[in-house]
Each structure stands twice: as C-alpha cells, then as structure tokens.
Image (tube, rainbow, N blue to C red):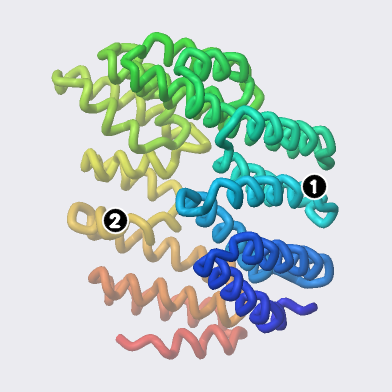
C-alpha cells in the first residue's frame, strides 16, 4: 500500500477504537480490551504490506496501547476479579506470534500488566511471562540488551513499590551494567545528598562504557552536577572545560559563575577559547561565547577565515566593523558566484547581494553586481537574476 493511502486505510481502525473506549465506559473491560487487541493485530499485519513513512499505522497501535495504559491506571474502580482477568489477558497477548519483531509493543503490554500486580502469585506470573519473553526475544544483541534493561527497570519499580528501600537499592546495585539503572542509582544518591557516591557511580559508568561516547558524557554530566553541589570548584572547572569542548554551551555559564576574580576568569576564558577554536565539535559553542563575552574582534577574525559565516554574524559585527562586514559580504558573493551552476544558485547569490544592500552596502552591492555581469557574459540566466536587483 502506498503511503498516500495509509491514512484512509486506518480510518476504520480509529472508529472501532472508539467502540473499545465506549465498552470501557460501560464496564465491558474485557470486551474493550479484545477490540483493541484485534486492532493491533490488524495494524501489525498492515505494516507488512504498507509504506508507513508517515507513521499513521504505528500511531494507531500506540493509541491502542495508550488506551490500555489508561485502563490499568484507572483500575481501582474495576472489581478485583475483573482486574485479574485483565492481567491474565495482557500476559497472554504478549506471546501472540504477530508481535514477533516488535518488542517495544510487547514490553508496553508487559508494563501495563505490571501495574495490576496485587499479590505474590501475580508477581510470580508476571516474572514468568517476563522471563519467557526475554528468552524468546529475537533480533540483534542490542535489541535483546534493550529488552533486558526495560524489564530490569520495571522490576525495580515493582520492588520499590512492594518491598523496602534496602531491597530496592540492592537490586539497583546488582544491575548497574544497565545505563538506565545506573542513572536511577546516581539520581537517588544525589537526592539523598550523597554526592561522593554519585561521583563514584558516575566514574564507574565512564570506565564501563568508555566505547560509548554518548553514555560517557552522560556520566560526566552527573559527575559535574555532584561537584557543583558539593562546591568542588577545581574539579567542576576542569570537567566543565571538557564538557564545553564537547559543544555543551550551557556549562560555560555554570563554570563562569565559579569565578569571582575577573583576572582569573579572563585567563580561563582565553584558554577555553583557544581550545575551542581548534575543536571540531566546538565551533558553535565558540561563537556563542564570543558573542556573549562581546569579543567582536575575535569573532571578526573567525568570520574572515570563512566568509560564508558573515550571514550568521553580520548583525553582531555591523555596529563595530561596518566596512569589514561589507567587504566580507563582497568576498562571499564573489565566492558563491564562482561556485554557482544553475538558476537556483544564481538566485541565492542575488539574495546575498540584497543582504549587502540592507547592511548599508548599496554602493558595494552595485559594484559587485556590475563585476559579475562583466565576469559571466555567457550565463543568461545569471544575468537575468542579477537584472532583477533594484538599486
């Protein structure tokens, strides 16, 4: 099915979903649940033969799952016997073959069932279903690890709700190899005022996940927060520099707040900018800081190295260096003209010429336009676009 037809194809499913919600309102919880499961099955089947680029089919499935979550969240008005039937029906649904290859939806149903647990017997049934699901999980090692992590987080929530904090903490610390579990442990340490434990957990995470740069920087950010909370200024500044080098502009302001001596801050700032200038990931942060610190001379030098940057920074530079700004626009226009190959390129060159006019460079815009007309006598489309400029 073409993506153009998907939205019409799922209209019927949306209408039927309304009937499921009506059944819930009338106390027909199992009937409404059966309707939603039927819709999900049909939509998964549709996914096998439809181009769901716009996500319309997936949205219907997610909507059904949201309705199921709302049902279990509002469970207290459902009789206990009916809650048990819903619980068992959810666990049965998880193992239906049409969910193979769609672990997120199986895990969502598992989570919904978990909200209904009220006894040790139900907990055992849930644990068995979770273990069975993980045991039959297909796909890559990454997807299996993801499922293991999701289940571990769900189990932690159940232990926290039904057992004492010591048991929950012990479970956390047995599963620190999962990033989300480690993050929960770090946040708990910070909330309890145990910054040293948060630092230890973060450093261990950095060592464990050193090949996963995104995770490493997540742990570094938590370590930075712990340093900030405990007033470990030197460690905060050192780690802040590293985070800023990685393009984290927000840490610039946080680090700056640790300085009361202007001379000391100036030295730190110069070192930071020198490093950022050479950092492949730091350009955006570098220019943000230059603007924030009103270091317009250094910003001008940065723009001179690549005149295309003038489009981004002419507003900041114009009040201080009007002639230099106009000269950079001219250099940029000539460069873009040399690179242009079609009418779209020509129109964009003319757009930049008009920007030059707007910054007070009417004379320079006229001169460069005449120069381009002379330089490109055999490009009629370019000459036509240039002729549209009004002086």
Frontmost of labels 1 and 2 is: 1
Q: Which residue is mark 2?
A: 324
The quadrant of the image that shows the N terminus is bottom right
**On screen, residue 189 above or below 391:** above
Circle 1 crowding by C-alpha within 10 Å: few under 14, some 14–19, many from 20? some
Q: Number of callouts in the render?
A: 2
User: x%, y% of residue 290?
Assistant: 29, 41
**On screen, residue 373 above or below 77:** below
**On screen, residue 261 above or below 157:** above
Circle 2 crowding by C-alpha within 10 Å: few under 14, some 14–19, many from 20? some
**On screen, residue 336 above or below 320:** below
Of the image marks 1 and 2, the number of the one nearer the N terminus: 1
For the residue pair 248 and 51, the one nearer the viewer reads as 51
* Label 2: which secondary element: helix
Q: Residue at x 34, y 17 (%)?
A: 192
Q: Left or right of 335: which side holds 316?
A: left
Give the Cα separation between the discs numbered 1 and 2: 69 Å
Q: Residue at x 46, y 23 (%)?
A: 220
Q: Quadrant of residue 6?
A: bottom right
Q: Residue at x 61, y 76 (%)?
A: 14
Q: Residue at x 35, y 43 (%)?
A: 287
Find residue 95 and name its label: 1
Residue 209 seen in the current view: yes
User: x%, y% of residue 84?
Assistant: 63, 45
For the residue pair 268 and 22, the one nearer the viewer reads as 22
For the residue pair 73 and 169, the one nearer the viewer reads as 73
* Label 1: which secondary element: loop
User: x%, y% of residue 147?
Assistant: 70, 37
For the residue pair 163 and 336, the one nearer the viewer reads as 163
Residue 206 seen in the current view: no
User: x%, y% of residue 370?
Assistant: 42, 80
The quadrant of the image that shows the C terminus is bottom left
């Amino acid at each position: 099915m073409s993506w153009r037809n998907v939205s019409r194809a799922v209209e019927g499913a949306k209408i039927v979903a309304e009937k499921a919600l009506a059944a819930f309102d009338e106390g027909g919880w199992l009937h409404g649940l059966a309707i939603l499961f039927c819709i999900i099955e049909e939509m998964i089947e549709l996914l096998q033969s439809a181009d769901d680029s716009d996500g319309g089919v997936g949205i219907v499935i997610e909507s059904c799952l949201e309705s199921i979550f709302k049902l279990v969240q509002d469970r207290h008005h459902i009789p206990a016997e009916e809650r048990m039937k819903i619980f068992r029906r959810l666990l049965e649904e998880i193992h239906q073959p049409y969910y193979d290859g769609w672990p997120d939806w199986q895990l969502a149903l598992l989570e919904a069932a978990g909200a209904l647990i009220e006894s040790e017997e139900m907990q055992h049934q849930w644990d068995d279903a979770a273990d069975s699901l993980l045991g039959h999980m297909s796909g890559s090692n990454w997807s299996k690890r993801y499922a293991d992590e999701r289940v571990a987080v769900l189990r932690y929530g159940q232990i926290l709700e039904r057992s004492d904090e010591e048991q929950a903490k012990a479970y956390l610390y047995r599963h620190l190899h999962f990033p989300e579990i480690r993050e929960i442990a770090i946040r708990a340490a910070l909330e309890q005022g145990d910054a040293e434990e948060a630092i230890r957990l973060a450093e261990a995470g950095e060592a464990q996940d050193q090949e996963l740069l995104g995770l490493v920087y997540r742990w570094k950010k938590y370590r930075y927060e712990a340093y900030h909370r405990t007033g470990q200024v030197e460690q905060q500044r050192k780690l802040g520099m590293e985070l800023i080098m990685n393009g984290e502009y927000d840490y610039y302001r946080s680090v700056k707040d640790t300085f009361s001596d202007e001379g000391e801050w100036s030295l730190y700032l110069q070192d930071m900018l020198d490093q950022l200038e050479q950092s492949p990931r730091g350009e955006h942060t570098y220019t943000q800081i230059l603007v924030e610190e009103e270091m317009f001379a250094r910003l001008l030098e940065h723009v001179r190295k690549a005149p295309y940057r003038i489009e981004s920074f002419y507003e900041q530079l114009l009040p201080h260096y009007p002639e230099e700004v106009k000269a950079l626009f001219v250099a940029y226009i000539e460069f873009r003209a040399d690179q242009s190959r079609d009418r779209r390129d020509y129109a964009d060159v003319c757009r930049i010429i008009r920007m030059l006019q707007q910054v007070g460079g009417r004379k320079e815009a006229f001169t460069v336009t005449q120069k381009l007309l002379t330089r490109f006598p055999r490009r009629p489309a370019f000459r036509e676009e240039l002729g549209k400029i009004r002086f």
